[in-house]
């Protein structure tokens, strides 16, 4: 039995679905999740269609003009390792590149770049529209889904606003902040998914009708300021790195010369802005709403209401080379426009700053991500995948990371391949998806390095070694990238062998390198010498005193990776046991048809209910469900082992 959820015209859908199986994968929405999803599916050879409201907004950066940061930079490297598009585009569009957290170890360095919005969109659109085979794009609004009802409902296409039906084997929805979205500025409220873009109401109704658990979240954006109305002399200058570090493993360098990078500037709020916020709460609908906003990217109103009596940083970030707009990062605001102007002018350096576009807030619906399997396919609807902000996350990088996985898995389903499931031990993408699908979220979720248990192994520098082969085996990584990764692996192995091939006493090494030391006659090879000590011993410093190592200086990126490998070698070895244990747990899959009501399971009703609701794919996932007791997990483990 075929039916069209909600829509009245139930005509000939059976014929349409069976005879005109036009596409393997349809991706709805051309944001950061959608572009990765459609590009990945197309790379795998699936016949793919991207349907999005406007071609001109494909790759639109709805809020901040930057990509990356702590944790987010890790995701970008992982998306890149799977041959994703956004990292390569960042290397072509940045106006300033800076690695954050440099004072800490390389495991938690955060690659970040200020991005020229126009360049980003131009390059991304060129990639998607002109350089991606197997991909068609149409500009339209998807209002409904076509489903086939069997034991489990199956999604077999979409319905557009003009009544056109397009069938497909799978659909990936990536509609971001658009579901039943409304914009708030002061007391003004109007439906919109983002300023200038319509809200998506039909599709939200469809998802509700399917019976998915939905929630509501909110976020906001700061006013944009005219660049030449700011007094930069009152600010601290923030320059970029020299040399800038590329995001993509395939980029030798970024497009911009170090000296041409644009500066950012830092100022602070003053206490004078507090009364403007506090005295006007009644005029600020967004703040008064009881919808949850982003904890880690709060509005200036939330900061003042939560931490009164403090001043807060404001980073002034250029929006691009040819833009005369400045994005005041930290000043997300939903006061009425005239009050936003007054507030801005109370901030040092912004006394004469002119608002070109006011800040605003957006409230939108999201789907409880516990409705999803870890492949990002819905448990309730076969062939329907969700990715991006629709799953309760916030941020371009989180969206891109989910998008690439949903695109790969939608294509894999059509091509009858197993899905790509990344575990928590393999990548931040695995952590993100596991957190979402097992724990759910009641506030906009963003990634942090602290969310990963295995930070020492999940580093930005080694994402290619962790993931490229997995992607290649799925068919979403090019031969060129795969070969390059193999070559890197080989060079690193050879490099370690070379470093291990020469040993001396610790005292001798240190004496040769001119480092003071007490007598230490332990024999150490070059690799071991880089593992310890308060002074940083580099490949370069070793090569100066040991000619055999000089060939390692031919490739500075490999030399740096060797130093990082050495630095973490000992710690990783001691972590290996833990990783193995988790892998063992994770390897134990829970059958999809497991009978949680079986008497043999012998667990409380509460535990059963939670497990039935979440349907954890693995024992490890079951153990992370809040409230499920360790004894229930143990019983489940025994039950699975005995019955499978
Ligand atoms: P989006 O980038 O939103 O893309 C969704 C796409 O789907 C759009 O192209 C849209 O046109 C299309 N679409 C929607 N419905 C349909 C339909 N029915 N048919 C066809 N196409 C459709 N992130 C942060 O990390 N920090 C912040 O402070 C922050 N503030 C934000 C403030 C605002 C006002 C907004 C709007 C977003 C903010 N974000 C912030 C979120 C960030 O923009 C998103 O995380 C990111 O863009 C999500 O990517 P996505 O691909 O999931 O969705």
Image: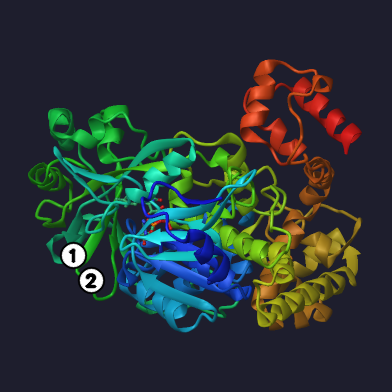
Q: Say which quarter of the image contains residue 462.
A: bottom right
Answer above or below: position of 95 versus 178.
below
Query: Is there any visible trace of residue 19 in the rendered image?
Result: yes
59 and 270: which one is in front?
Answer: 59
Answer above or below: position of 141 versus 492.
above
Question: Along the horizontal axis of the image, is 575 left or right of 337?
Answer: right
Residue bearing mark 2: 323
Q: Nearer the viewer, mark 2 or mark 1?
A: 2
Q: Which SS class for mark 2?
A: loop
Q: Residue at x 80, y 28 (%)?
A: 636
Task: Determine whether the beta carbon of the residue marked 1 sits less than 8 angstroms from the nearest atom of ligand 1.
Answer: no
Report the residue that reaches farthest toward the top. 604
| Numbered circle sitting on residue 36 | none
Q: Residue at x 74, y 40 (%)?
A: 618
Q: Say which quarter of the image contains residue 499.
A: bottom right
Residue bearing mark 1: 227
Query: Is there any visible trace of residue 240 in the rendered image?
Result: no
Q: Which SS class for mark 1?
A: helix
Find the distance from the CA under tag 2 to the CA under tag 1: 8 Å
525 and 76: which one is in front?
Answer: 76
Q: Position of residue 82 (x, y in %)?
A: 63, 67
Q: Are marks 2 and 1 in contact (CB under 8 Å)?
A: yes
43 and 211: which one is in front?
Answer: 211
Q: Residue at x 36, y 47 (%)?
A: 179
Question: Along the horizontal axis of the image, is 353 left or right of 22?
Answer: left
Q: Residues within 10 Å of mark 1 (few under 14, many from 20)?
A: many
């Amino acid at each position: 039995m075929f039916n069209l959820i909600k829509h009245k015209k139930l005509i000939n859908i059976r014929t349409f679905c069976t005879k005109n199986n036009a596409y393997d994968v349809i991706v709805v929405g051309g944001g950061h999740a959608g572009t990765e999803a459609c590009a990945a599916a197309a790379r795998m050879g699936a016949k793919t269609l991207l349907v999005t409201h406007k071609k001109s907004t494909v790759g639109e950066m709805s809020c901040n003009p930057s990509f990356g940061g702590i944790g987010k930079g890790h995701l970008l490297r992982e998306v890149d390792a799977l041959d994703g598009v956004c990292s390569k585009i960042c290397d072509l569009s940045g106006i300033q590149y800076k690695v954050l957290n440099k004072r800490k170890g390389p495991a938690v360095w955060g690659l970040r770049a200020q991005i020229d919005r126009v360049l980003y969109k131009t390059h991304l659109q060129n990639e998607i529209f002109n350089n991606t085979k197997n991909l068609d794009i149409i500009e339209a609004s998807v209002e409904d889904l076509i489903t086939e009802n069997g034991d489990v409902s199956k999604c077999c296409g979409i319905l557009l606003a003009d009544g056109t039906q397009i069938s497909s084997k799978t659909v990936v929805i990536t509609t971001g902040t658009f579901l039943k979205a409304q914009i708030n500025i002061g007391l003004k409220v109007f439906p919109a998914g983002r300023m200038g873009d319509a809200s998506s109401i039909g599709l939200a109704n469809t998802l509700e009708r399917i019976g998915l658990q939905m929630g509501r979240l909110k976020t906001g954006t700061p006013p944009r300021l005219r660049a030449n109305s700011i007094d930069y002399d009152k600010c601290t200058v923030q320059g970029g790195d020299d040399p800038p570090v590329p995001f993509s493993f395939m980029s030798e360098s970024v497009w911009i010369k170090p000296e041409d990078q644009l500066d950012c500037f830092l100022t602070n709020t003053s206490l004078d802005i507090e009364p403007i916020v506090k005295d006007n709460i009644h005029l600020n609908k967004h703040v008064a709403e009881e919808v949850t906003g982003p904890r880690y990217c709060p509005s200036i109103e939330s900061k003042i209401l939560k931490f009164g009596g403090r001043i807060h940083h404001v980073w002034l970030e250029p929006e691009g080379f040819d833009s005369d707009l400045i994005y005041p990062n930290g000043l997300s605001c939903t006061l009425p426009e005239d009050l936003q102007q007054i507030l801005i002018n109370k901030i040092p350096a912004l006394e004469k700053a002119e608002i070109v576009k006011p800040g605003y807030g957006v409230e939108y619906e999201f789907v409880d991500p516990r409705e999803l399997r870890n492949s990002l396919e819905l448990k309730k609807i076969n062939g329907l995948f969700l990715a991006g902000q629709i799953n309760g996350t916030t941020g371009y990088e989180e969206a891109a990371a989910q998008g690439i996985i949903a695109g790969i898995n939608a294509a894999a389903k059509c091509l009858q391949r197993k899905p790509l499931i990344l575990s928590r031990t393999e990548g931040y993408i695995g952590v993100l998806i596991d957190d979402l699908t097992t724990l759910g979220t009641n506030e906009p979720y963003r990634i942090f390095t602290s969310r990963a248990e295995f930070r020492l192994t999940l580093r930005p520098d080694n994402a290619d070694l962790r993931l490229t082969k997995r992607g290649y085996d799925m068919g979403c990584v090019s031969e060129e990238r795969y070969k390059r990764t193999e070559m890197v692996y080989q060079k690193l192995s050879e490099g370690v062998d070379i470093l291990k091939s020469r040993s001396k006493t610790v005292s001798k090494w240190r004496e040769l390198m001119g480092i003071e030391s007490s007598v230490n006659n332990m024999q150490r090879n070059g690799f071991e010498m880089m593992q310890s000590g308060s002074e940083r011993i580099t490949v370069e410093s070793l090569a100066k005193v040991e000619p055999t190592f000089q060939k390692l200086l031919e490739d500075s990126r490999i030399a740096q990776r060797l130093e990082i490998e050495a630095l973490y070698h000992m710690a990783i070895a001691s972590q290996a046991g833990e990783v193995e244990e988790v892998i063992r747990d994770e390897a134990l899959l829970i059958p999809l048809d497991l009978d949680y009501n079986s008497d043999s399971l012998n667990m409380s009703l509460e535990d059963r209910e939670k497990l039935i609701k979440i349907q954890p794919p693995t024992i490890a996932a079951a153990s992370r469900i809040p409230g499920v007791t360790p004894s229930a997990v143990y019983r489940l483990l025994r039950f699975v082992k005995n019955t499978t």
